[in-house]
Amino acid sequence: MKKILTCIASALLVVGVIGTPQATDAQTPLQVIWKTKMKFGSAASSIDGTGAITINSVNNTRSVTGEAFDFGGNWSRGKFQLVGEPKAFVIVTLPSSFTLTNNAGTFSIEVTDITMSRTNPIKLSKAGKKTVFIGGKVNITTNQKARTYKNGGFIIDADYL
């Protein structure tokens, strides 16, 4: 017997950015500009075991594994842009996990294995920009309630090297 779960999750971003120029430098402030939310689509859980939906940050693929059943829906990797000093190197730090809740905040689902499409340090272009994609994994438990999970987010910390 299957227990139906609708898992539409968007990773909403709260951005924490610190650019630390040297006292004698007039360095351009570093910005993180959010472009696209990370969405996992829809799936159903099973009483037979757990499952997961994974979004790959590099190649924008989606996989549904374990005892979860894929119902498609809208899904995509997240996207943000770094804007700062031309040709500067930036270190980006992401959390290892965060929690999404339904609108009422009574049910939650955990997003783990958060990754980005680039490796640190990230070099900004001649124009001082670089696009970075975000991926992650939603872990679906056997007791997961059928809800839309979209409230929550995490902090991206970005600093000049």
Image: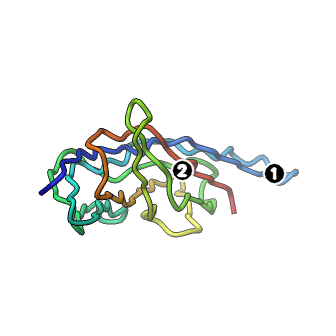
Residue 125 got which mark?
none
Side of 72 relative to 50 (left or right) = left
User: How far is mark 2 from mark 1, CA to CA?
Assistant: 20 Å
Q: Secondary structure at mark 1?
A: loop
Residue in the picture at 24% in, 67% down: 65
Depicted 106 relative to depicted 87: above or below: above
Q: Nearer the viewer, residue 76 or 150?
A: 150
Identify residue type, mark 1: Asp
According to the image, label 1 marks what residue? 25
Quick one: which residue is furthest to the top in this view?
104
Q: On the image, which quarter does residue 113 sit in?
A: bottom left
Side of 91 relative to 151 (left or right) = right
Marks 2 and 1: which is nearer the front?
A: 2
Residue in the picture at 49% in, 44% down: 153
Give the tally of numbered discs: 2
Depicted 122 relative to depicted 154: above or below: below
Residue in the picture at 21% in, 52% down: 43
Label 2, residues with CA under 10 Å away: few <14, some 14-19, many ≥20:
many
Q: Quadrant of the N terminus?
A: bottom left
Spot occupied by residue 141 in the image (x, y as percentages of width and height): 32, 58
Spot occupied by residue 154 in the image (x, y as percentages of width and height): 53, 47
Q: Secondary structure at mark 2?
A: strand
Side of 143 relative to 85 (left or right) = left
Spot occupied by residue 94 in the image (x, y as percentages of width and height): 55, 58
Q: On the image, which quarter does residue 58 sit in?
A: bottom left
According to the image, label 2 marks what residue? 82
Q: On the image, which quarter does residue 64 sit in?
A: bottom left
